[in-house]
Image (cartoon, grey):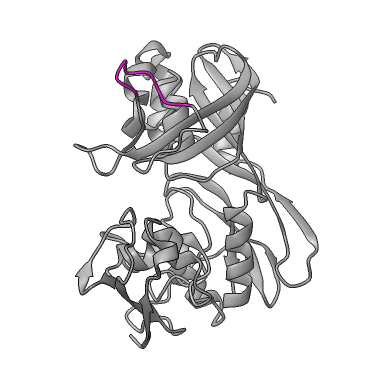
Amino acid sequence: MPEALLNIIVSSEMEAIRIDKFLSLNPEIKTRSRAEYLIQNSLVKVNGHIIKPSYKVKANDHIQVDIPLASPSSSLEKLDIALDIVYEDKDLLVVNKPSGLVVHPAAGHQNDTLVNALLHHTKNLSMKFGEDRPGIVHRIDKETSGLLVVAKNDESHTHLSEQFKNRTITRFYEAIVTGKINPAQGKIISYLARKENERKKYASLRDHKNHIIDNVDLGFDKGKLAITNYQTLAQAGNLSLVKLKLETGRTHQIRVHLSEKGHPIIGDYTYGAKAKEKNLHPNLVEQIKNSKRFFLHAKTLGFIHPITKENLLFEVDWPEAEKKLINLWKLYA
């Protein structure tokens, strides 16, 4: 893959700053999310060594960054599947992703992802995050359905990434969870980090008394601040339909927050739903199992168009099959 080599010497004024934050200040990189991508893909070396995003730079450190240039990998195959395009222009598109579709190539999913389908749909995709995920500004989980914005050029990608970083993006999700949440609405705050013994799972950091750390003034290098606002829309039997507004967009954020509150998303067996579903009617459990997904839906997405500066707001309902179940379960919003 073609790439540009960036050489940086750290000045004494910048000492002790995390390297992902330090690199985001560089005009060739611009965002912390792109800096993290470069670091995690071993494209950043400090004094000749691969480092982690938490590394704190020192005066006179020699940093080398291999920046991928704009050309999708020829190894990425095009996938001819129908996409539900909600909006499209020359700078971006908004897609309604179905449950079951992985967003970008990863282990076990090289050529059956949204990226592969996008490559079949258009030749114009940004390369801000390198050849393996052209156009991808943000992600939602494989089993999650709903809205994603995709950038067609690097300028759009940069502007959209900044909006996510500055928390000006409007994002509302809906989820179906076990039990009745008390209080019916509120805010969940924690610091999320990978679990040490289960690297594919995340959890909130806890203090020495095993209480979840929710003081936003403290800050932690080991975890990322996650803030989720929730509101119960409907409740029937032992299920609740919940609306969620994200202030941050951490990996598995909603799933972890709801699970740790004692109300995992139904079908989310990674985060405790199986144990909670034992209290549900067997027919309901079978319906959840047959759906082959967990019930989380990215319903609303709003942002400022990176080029025209127009305020855009999109909304999509649950997929038809899930909508029928929601009505069957009498979870009327």
- Name, please, the residue furthest toward the front: 12
Query: Magenta stretch mostly in which secondary structure?
Result: loop
In the image: residue 327, left or right of residue 62:
right
* Residue 209 drawn in magenta: yes
Up/down of 267 relative to 159, above or below:
above
> Residue at 49% of width from left, 14% of height from top?
179
> Can I make out residue 114 in this image?
no
In the image, residue 283 lies at what x, y percent?
A: 42, 19
In the image: residue 2, left or right of residue 186:
left
In the image, residue 294 lies at what x, y percent?
A: 44, 36
In the image: residue 249, left or right of residue 252:
right
Give the extent of the magenta segment: 207-214
Q: Nearer the viewer, residue 198 or 19?
A: 19
User: Residue 162 falls in which quadrant of the image?
Assistant: bottom right
Q: Quadrant of the C terminus?
A: top right
In the image, residue 43 lies at what x, y percent?
A: 30, 73
User: Residue 111 falls in which quadrant of the image?
Assistant: bottom left
